[in-house]
Amino acid sequence: MEELTVGTRVEHPRYGEGIVSKDNITAYEIFFERGGKIEITKRNTDLKVLNLNQTGAKSGLSIRDFEKVMTYVLDQYGALSEIVPLGEKWQGGTLLMQPANPALQPKEIPIETFFHKIVMLRDRLRVLEQNINSSNVLSDEEKVNLQQYITRVYGSLTTFNVLFSEKDHYFVGVKSK
């Protein structure tokens, strides 16, 4: 069946004539003479179009609109991880941690692995910030104190900015005046 627009007149064998009042992602909301407001899935084959409203604007969300909304919501709550590129000069490199005691073995790990952990740490700090800001339990003063503490943590991590490809991704602490 073709997409129906708001205002299209339809007929259903059980509910009689009706008018499409809403076009949702997977269903139409239709007001029927005999059944009142009923939601019918778009896959339903019982609907017969009596008069297609070709000028009616669609209401509800298209799949594309839904994707935009979901992306926005997931981003707001830190559920989407941004792709953060490692600086080109570090790609394929290793991090060598050499103990002061020469009898001990050094530890070598790929820089990509270390960088990924730094980015995860940053993302989790952002989620923590969002949870603090949206808390109904914390007072404004407590929120400010916790925010200042997180800002100082970011400042402690600025050493790792050398690994980032773009300055937009840098850690930023308290700015000097």
Image (spheres, rainbow, N blue to C red):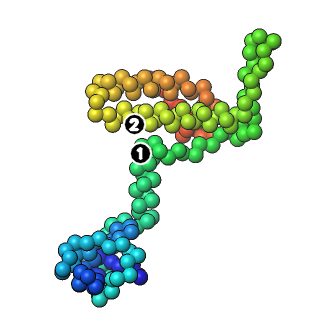
Q: Which residue is mark 2?
A: 130
Q: Where does residue 8 sit, x and y in percent of width and height? A: 29, 82
- SS class of the residue under badge 1? helix
Q: Residue lying furthest front in this view?
A: 14
Q: Residue lying furthest right in this view?
A: 103
- Above or below 130: residue 38: below
* Circle 1: residue type: Gln
Q: Which residue is mark 1?
A: 76
- Above or below 158: residue 84: below
Residue 141: quadrant of the picture: top left
In the figure, is residue 52 to the left or right of 121?
A: left
Asked whether residue 167 appears in the rendered view, the answer is: yes
Q: Which corner quadrant holds the N terminus?
A: bottom left
Dot label at residue 8: none
Q: 74 or 173, which is in the foreground?
A: 74
**Who's the residue at 44% across and 26% down the image?**
150
- Above or below 49: residue 173: above
Q: How many marks?
A: 2
**Who's the residue at 56% across and 36% down the image?**
120
- SS class of the residue under badge 2? helix
Q: Where does residue 168 sit, x and y in percent of width and height? A: 54, 40
In the figure, is residue 168 to the left or right of 56?
A: right
In the figure, is residue 67 to the left or right of 23?
A: right
Q: Residues within 10 Å of mark 2 (few under 14, many from 20)?
A: some
* Circle 2: residue type: Gln
Residue 163: quadrant of the picture: top right
- The span from disc 1 to disc 2 (Cα, nearest Å) is 8 Å
Q: Where does residue 113 sit, x and y in percent of width and height? A: 67, 35
Residue 60: quadrant of the picture: bottom left
